[in-house]
Amino acid sequence: MTKGTTIPVFFAVDNRYVPYLAAALISLQTQANPADNYQIKILYQKQHLSVHNQQQLATLIKPKTSLEFVALDTSLWDKLGQDPNTLRADYLTLTIYYRLFIANLFPQYERGIYLDADVIINYDLGYLYRLNLHEQMIGAVTDAFISHHQVTANYAEQAIGVPRNEYFNSGILLLDLKQMRACQLSQHFLYLMNKYHFPLIAPDQDYLNAIGHQRLFLLADEWNFQTEYPLATITQPKIVHYNLYGKPWHYNNIAFQDLFWQALRQTPYYNQVYQEQQLYLNSPQKIQADKDHKALLLKRVCDIPQQTSTFKTAAMQGEQVQI
């Protein structure tokens, strides 16, 4: 295996997700080949990531790993047209879009890995970084929640305009940043967003699917084991992704939850998160809120394909959606 590779890894986070990012950072370094050098970049919006949390995260960094916090330009909110789409039908955060700007923000890199903060790395991430993308721009795993149900599959095909088994989850991405710059992905994204303001259930993910479908290389499912719809065929996931409502910091019956708590114990956030879970488990209102938000998410999945403003209808009317 190639030795001494410099591997850039990107996260986007706010104060709410810092404890889970801390666990992810521990797991990444635990699994890392000591010959490799990791350059971790944390993208954040000013005023949404405290100095205290930055200092706490910095204490977790081991030799052969560097950590840099990159505050994004506050004008980005205006560039995004103050997009009203929410994550999980309940959480409005600008950080979901930051992965779309990585290529432009870091011209020194030709490829990189983007990870959501709600992951645990269970394998040497260097193997992911070195995978052959076969000249494609995006390496990703099919979104299990979308592809395995008729209603959600219809959303992928009729609203986003991609086959159900090729609609990917954007929580773990292997990116050819050189290609992203060459095809001006971020500029094309901003053009489409500000022209159409498509209603969406997974804003960043839907844009990436619609824009990048022809430049996709599907990765093996074990690189993004999604706890919202756990695949029984995967017994040794390389990355566990606690996506949507499958959060071990809220519930006790989440697949591979032990990996999360094992990593979290090595951070300053263990007691805080454990108390958060106990409050959640003892709060019927919070549990019901999750059920209500999931029901709303599924309602939007049904409703959006019936609306006139979708990626598919825009493409049928002559708009260049894919790059």
Image: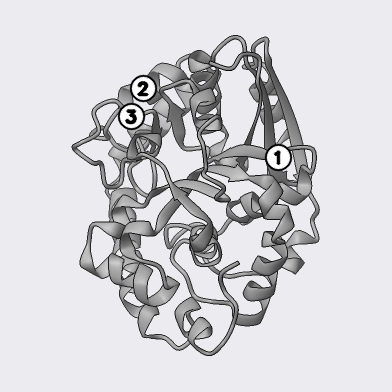
Residue at x-position 79% and y-position 56%: 74
Of tags 2 and 1, which is closer to the observer?
A: 1
Instruction: Choose top left, top right, bottom left or bottom right for residue 147.
Output: bottom left
Outermost residue to the left: 232
* Residue type of the residue flagged with mark 1: Glu
Q: Which of these two is toward me, 132 or 155?
A: 132
Residue 159, given in percent of the width and then of the height, sits at: 41, 75
Residue at x-position 23% and y-position 34%: 253
Q: Which mark is residue 296?
A: none
Instruction: Choose top left, top right, bottom left or bottom right for residue 84.
Output: bottom right
Which residue was labeled with disc 2? 259
Q: Which mark is residue 237?
A: 3
Which residue was labeled with disc 1? 110
Q: Which of these two is toward me, 113 or 80?
A: 113
Of tags 3 and 2, which is closer to the observer?
A: 3
Of tags 3 and 1, which is closer to the observer?
A: 1
Residue 115, given in percent of the width and then of the height, sits at: 54, 39
Q: Please determine whether, in this image, residue 229 is positioned above or below residue 189.
A: above
Residue 107, given in percent of the width and then of the height, sits at: 79, 43
Q: Which of these two is toward me, 231 or 174?
A: 174
Apparent side of residue 225 relative to residue 60 in the rendered image (left or right): left
Labels 3 and 2: the sequence-earlier one: 3
Residue at x-position 62% and y-position 10%: 35
Labels 3 and 1: the sequence-earlier one: 1
* Inter-mark Cα distance, 2 to 1: 31 Å
Q: Secondary structure at mark 3?
A: loop
Q: Are marks 2 and 1 in contact (CB under 8 Å)?
A: no
Q: 10 Å neighbourhood of mark 1: few (<14), some, or many (≥20)?
A: some
Apparent side of residue 18 relative to residue 51 in the rendered image (left or right): left
* Inter-mark Cα distance, 3 to 1: 27 Å
